[in-house]
Image (cartoon, rainbow, N blue to C red):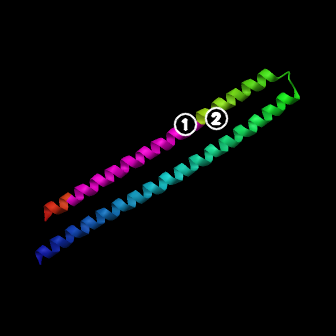
Amino acid sequence: MMTMTTTRRRTTTITMTMMMMMMTLMMMITTMTTITMLLVIVTIMLLLLLMTMLLLMMRWRRRSRTRTRTTTTTTTMMMMMMMMTMMMTMMMTMMMMMMMMMMMMMMMIMMMMMMMMMIMMR
């Protein structure tokens, strides 16, 4: 009876830990996906803004050639800003991916350890 109870306890604890791990993994995946989606949306919006600005600048140039310098400077500044934002978003996405990979690796290691413990206990 005692042996049965102990084994049952061990199995329950293992199952509980497994469930917890799975839950955490799911949460991580969901959060990462949401963040990535948001970043993608932001990047698209920025690109659209850039395109519109460029079009406007082109029109300005066509209309008046007196303000060429100002328009060019503004366009360059906007381009630089957009590039910086894009780079930042890309970096953020990369970081998120790296974090996700690291977490996955950690989870795998934990699972392996748990398996080893199970074997040892037996």
Tell me, yes or no, whether the highlighted magenta stretch contains residue 6. no
Label 2: element kind: helix
| 26 lies above or below 46 | below
| 44 lies above or below 18 | above
Q: Are marks 1 and 2 in contact (CB under 8 Å)?
A: no
| Residue 62: x %, y % from top left | 85, 29
The residue located at (39%, 58%) in the rendering is 24
Q: Earlier in the sequence, mark 1 or mark 2?
A: 2
Amino acid type of the residue tagged 1 in the rendering: Met
| Residue 113 quadrant | bottom left
Amino acid type of the residue tagged 2 in the rendering: Met
In the image, taking residue 18 as reference, residue 61 lies left or right, namely right
The residue located at (39%, 57%) in the rendering is 25
The magenta span reads: 86-115
User: Which of the pair 1/51 is nearer the observer?
Assistant: 51
Quadrant where the image shows the N terminus: bottom left
Label disc, if present, on residue 82 of the rendered structure: 2
